[in-house]
Image: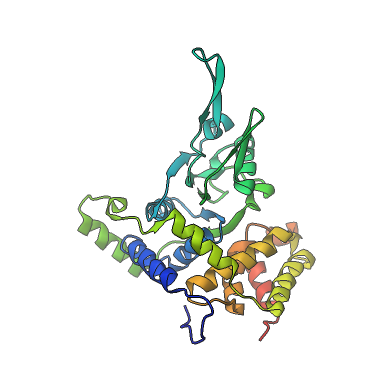
């Protein structure tokens, strides 16, 4: 991250100290993956959900678990399977013979940080059960609305859709994720470091070594700070130009929605803040634009047949738009 050479209007000292602690704590367990860690911290401060995609074994679930452990809030994990029903996630109303009334038994979705493992292994009706809670932070069951306590963040992992037994997530659900983070294989040097650390631990699970760094009150306070981060009007225009280009680009069948432009704005503010600045720079926007857009646009059939990836087109769009100075 760039050094802050400007005078801030907001005191970000407390936040910067906490971000350093979080990165140091995660760095003791996770090798590399600096971009993923930056994006996860950004998403939590921007009040956004995260989808992490990668082949099995690249520490997607481990990273999500560690992030939940460094925050002193309630955590629940849901393993998605093809036979999972909506009531298994949301909960059910059970008739109490003693009181002659129905009582609601809350499901695992009622927590602060929810880890959904292999989210694309459940069918469409189970995916649809997440729509309301991800967007509105509430669940309506049997005519009663149950609100979630902040912070409320869904961290979901998925395997690439080409793998056996996976379902493509509905576009409406994908749009509710602030980021889609693509996790690749480690380099040879990183793989050697992974082996070295695993050998040194001698059977101790890495999650057991992690202690909480942040509280719910601190997160809610930092989110208020993020709302106050300054952004120039020409940078708002820059965000709008990127979004408009996704709708007019011939390589894309479906462009990004207005929710995507708001997502870039909020993510850029949060990333600027954890970078030690109380103002957004064009580099902040460029950093968050790809993970915000890669799951919100759909390639044209011609480009898909040519083997072009969504990331390729989004990068071309970002590079094409002139950066305001």
Whether residue 148 is visible:
yes
Q: Is residue 240 left or right of residue 282?
A: right
Give the image quarter of residue 259.
bottom right
Percent position of residue 234, x then y: 71, 79
Between 44 and 222, the residue placed more toward the observer is 222
Whether residue 256 is visible:
no
Total marks in image: 0
Q: Is residue 77 above or below residue 319?
A: above
Between 122 and 177, the residue placed more toward the observer is 177
Q: Is residue 314 above or below residue 319?
A: above
Give the image quarter of residue 215.
bottom left
Q: What residue do we see at 63% from left, 51% from top?
A: 174
Percent position of residue 157, x then y: 50, 50
Percent position of residue 252, x then y: 74, 62
Q: How is the image coloured?
A: rainbow
Give the image quarter of residue 214.
bottom left
Q: Quadrant of the C terminus?
A: bottom right
Between 104 and 246, the residue placed more toward the observer is 104
Q: Is residue 171 left or right of residue 222?
A: right
Q: What residue do we see at 28% from left, 60% from top?
A: 195
Q: What residue do we see at 51% from left, 39% from top?
A: 110
Q: Is residue 22 left or right of residue 43?
A: left
Percent position of residue 182, x then y: 52, 60
Q: Is residue 169 above or below residue 253?
A: above
Between 110 and 34, the residue placed more toward the observer is 110
């Amino acid at each position: 991250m760039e050094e802050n050479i400007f005078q801030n209007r907001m005191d970000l000292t407390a936040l910067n100290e906490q971000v350093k602690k979080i990165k140091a704590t995660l760095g003791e367990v996770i090798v590399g993956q600096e971009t993923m860690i930056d994006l996860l911290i950004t998403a939590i401060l921007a009040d956004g959900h995260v989808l992490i995609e990668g082949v099995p074994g690249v520490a997607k679930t481990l990273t999500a678990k560690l992030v939940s452990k460094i925050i002193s809030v309630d955590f629940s994990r849901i393993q998605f399977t093809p036979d999972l029903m909506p009531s298994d996630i949301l909960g059910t109303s059970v008739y109490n013979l003693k009181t002659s009334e129905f009582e609601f038994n809350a499901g695992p979705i009622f927590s602060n940080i929810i880890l959904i493992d292999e989210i694309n292994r459940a069918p469409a009706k189970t995916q649809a059960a997440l729509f309301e809670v991800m967007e509105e932070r509430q669940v309506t069951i049997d005519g009663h609305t149950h609100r979630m306590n902040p912070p409320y963040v869904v961290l979901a992992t998925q395997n690439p859709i080409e793998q056996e037994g996976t379902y493509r997530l509905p576009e409406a659900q994908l749009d509710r994720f602030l980021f889609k983070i693509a996790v690749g294989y480690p380099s040879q040097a990183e793989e050697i470091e992974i082996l070295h650390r695993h050998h040194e631990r001698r059977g101790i699970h890495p999650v057991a070594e992690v202690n909480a760094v942040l509280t719910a009150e601190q997160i809610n306070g930092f989110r208020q700070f993020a709302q106050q981060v300054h952004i120039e009007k020409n940078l708002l225009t820059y965000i709008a130009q990127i979004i408009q280009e996704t709708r007019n680009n011939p390589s894309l069948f479906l462009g990004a929605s207005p929710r995507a432009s708001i997502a870039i704005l909020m993510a850029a503010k949060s990333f600027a803040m954890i970078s030690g600045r109380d103002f957004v720079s064009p580099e902040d926007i460029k950093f968050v634009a790809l993970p915000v857009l890669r799951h919100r646009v759909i390639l044209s059939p011609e480009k898909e047949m040519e083997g072009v990836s969504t990331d390729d087109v989004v990068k071309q769009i970002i590079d094409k738009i002139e950066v305001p100075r």
